[in-house]
Structure formats: C-alpha cells, structure tokens
Amino acid sequence: MAPKRNKLRKTIFEAGKAVGKGANKAGQIVRDTASDRGLENRLPSGVADKLLPPRPLEEVQAELDALVGLDSVKEQVATQIAFLQVQERRREHGLDDINTSRHLVFMGNPGTGKTTVARLLAEMYGSIGLLEKGHLVEVDRAGLVGKYVGHTASKTNKVVKRALGGVLFIDEAYALSPPGIQTNDFGAEAIETLLKRMEDHRDRLVVVVAGYPKLMEQFLHSNPGLRSRFAREIVFPDYSTDELIKITEKIAQDYDFHLSDDAEKALNRIFKQVVRNDAFGNARFARNLFEQALNKQAVRLSQGDVGALDKHAVTEITGDDLKAAAAQVEVPISAETRRLRRI
C-alpha cells in the first residue's frame, strides 16, 4: 500500500504545480481516485486542496445545473450562494453583517445526490472566497465517535481540523443521537464538540449534516441548540422514473456504452416496478443495475465468437441484459438504519 500511497502523493503535488482549468480537472481526478481507493484519509490534510486553485463559480454552477433533476435543490443552493455574495458585498461597503448561519441540513433517501451537491457547494464557497480551500471532508458516526471516555472529543476535533477552510459533510448524522436510553453512547459528546467548533470556526468551517428525512428530524430535536445552528434544511426528493432513465443513459454514455431501442422500455418497466421505500437507492440503484447489465452483456456475447464482435456489439446494452440484471439487484439498507428501526 505504501508505494501506491507515495505515487498518489507525487501525482497530487505534480497536479498542484499546473495552472488553470487543466490543473483543476487533473486535481479532481486525483481526489476522486484517492477517494475510490480509500486513501484520502491517509494523505496529509488537504494536500491537493492547498495546491489547486478553486474553479470559477460559473464552471461549478454549470456542473450543478447539468445534474439530472433536483430542481428544488438547485434553486435553494443558488439562493444560498446569492445571499452570501450580497452579504460579502455589504461588508465591503462597511455595512452591518446579518448574523446568519452557513451550515445546512440535507434530507433525502440514499442516492439522491446529497454528497455530490455537498462537494459542489464546497467548491462554490471556495470560488466566492467564503472558504479558503473549498474542499469536502466526508465522515459518518465512526469517524467522530470514540470507544472510551475522552476519545470522542479528540477524534471529532481532528476531523474538524481537517475540514477547516472547507465543508464537513456528516452522512447519516442521525446515528450520533440514536433513540432510546444510550448509557454508553458517546454520540452526544460528538454533537456537543461539533456545536462548539461550529461557533469557534464560524468563518472557516461549514457543516452539512445529511440523512433520511424522518431520522434527521429526530436528530435535529436531540439537542436544544442543534436545529438553530443550521441556515437551511434542503430536501432531496426521490428521482422519478424518467429521471432514473436519464441517469442510466448518462452512466452508459460516460463508459462509452449505448442502450438498444428496447432498453428504454425495459428500464421504464423496471423502475416503475421497484419498491420505492427509504431503502431504495435511487441513482445508486440505477448504477448497480447498469453494472449488473454489463455482466449479463458479457455472458451473452461470450456465447458466440468473441473475436468477431464489432464495436457496436461490445458497446450495446439490450433490454434483455437489463431485465436479467434487475433480478440480481437488491434494494440496499444500511446496518445502522436497520438497527435504529428496531429500537
């Protein structure tokens, strides 16, 4: 693992020496690769983000606008950015600043784009100068809560330190305050520590907490001072059938595949039949379905002369591939959510 880690560090530093749009793109690829391999937490804090300049706001906004669906989310993000820009302009004119929070609550089921929007929001904050680096640090309960007395505060403070100058994104934040009597649970200590750091670093840190709508409501009522710390509560709706079809088509295009004429009908039937509960993965389900379809395509094509396959054949996903894949894809549910529902 060490040689790979050192190679990744070297790549990041080399990308950071470049200038302009190409450097931003290269840096994002490096960050995504590190995240996919689980290496981002092993690198020096914020290395790539310290070296790479933020992308222009217009470029980040265009990426947000290009996301499928999420119209209400895009509108609220645009409103938040506009408000903060005007506030900054007021300060430049020597006018009083309106004392308002920058922290946000994202409520939505899995696969509705919460993490993606949080990353883009962090970049926007960096682009307008609200945050120094505009990077995203993503954690869950395990990244904040320790196993013994005194460990949680230290662990939480370290995470906050990594996030300074950017956005701290806490996924499944409700797990910090499980319902019922929790005599040995240190989640409350993590919340108290976060509340203090949110106030201490109000100009250097933005916290976004995210999770299932119902459980997030419980979380926001778990501490008297918690809900008032957040400026907005943004609801991420489930994707419609048409939007899920568009997402699947885009995933296919990103990997140089295309869907056959009967594939869209198959997708329409699959997405309409799947159970839409809070365990439904939305875009995550669409991606899993597509990946399973690739396996089914490979099995189908291998039954003939593989050497004679042309480009069209190896890049086409058919309706039958998708139907076979649908039988293999399960609606996921996290162990933590399953545990919380039993309480």
Image (cartoon, rainbow, N blue to C red):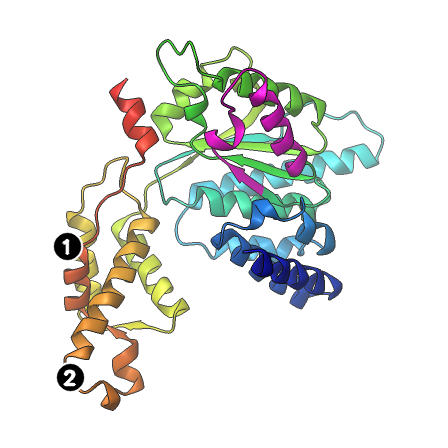
Tell me the residue that label 1 is attached to.
Answer: 327
Is residue 62 in view from this perspective?
yes
Residue 41, horizontal then vertical, whole percent: 57, 44
Tell me the residue that label 2 is attached to.
Answer: 304
Q: Could you tell me which quadrant the C terminus lies in?
A: top left
**Residue shown at 47% from the left, 29% from the top:** 141
Is residue 261 in view from this perspective?
no
2 and 1 marks in contact (CB < 8 Å): no
Of residues 74 and 319, the one drawn nearer to the viewer in this rendering: 319
Badge 1 amino acid: Ala
**Residue shown at 36% from the left, 45% from the top:** 111
Numbered tag placed on residue 155 in the rendering: none
Badge 2 amino acid: Gly
Magenta extent: 137-163
Residue 99, horizontal then vertical, whole percent: 69, 22
Q: Quadrant of residue 256?
A: bottom left
Of residues 140 and 6, the one drawn nearer to the viewer in this rendering: 6
Residue 249, horizontal then vertical, whole percent: 32, 64
Q: Residues within 10 Å of mark 1 (few under 14, many from 20)?
A: few
In the rendered view, would you say 271 is above or below 221? below
At mark 2, the secondary structure is: loop
Check if residue 150 falls in the magenta segment: yes
Mark 2 to mark 1 CA distance (whole Å) = 24 Å
At mark 1, the secondary structure is: loop
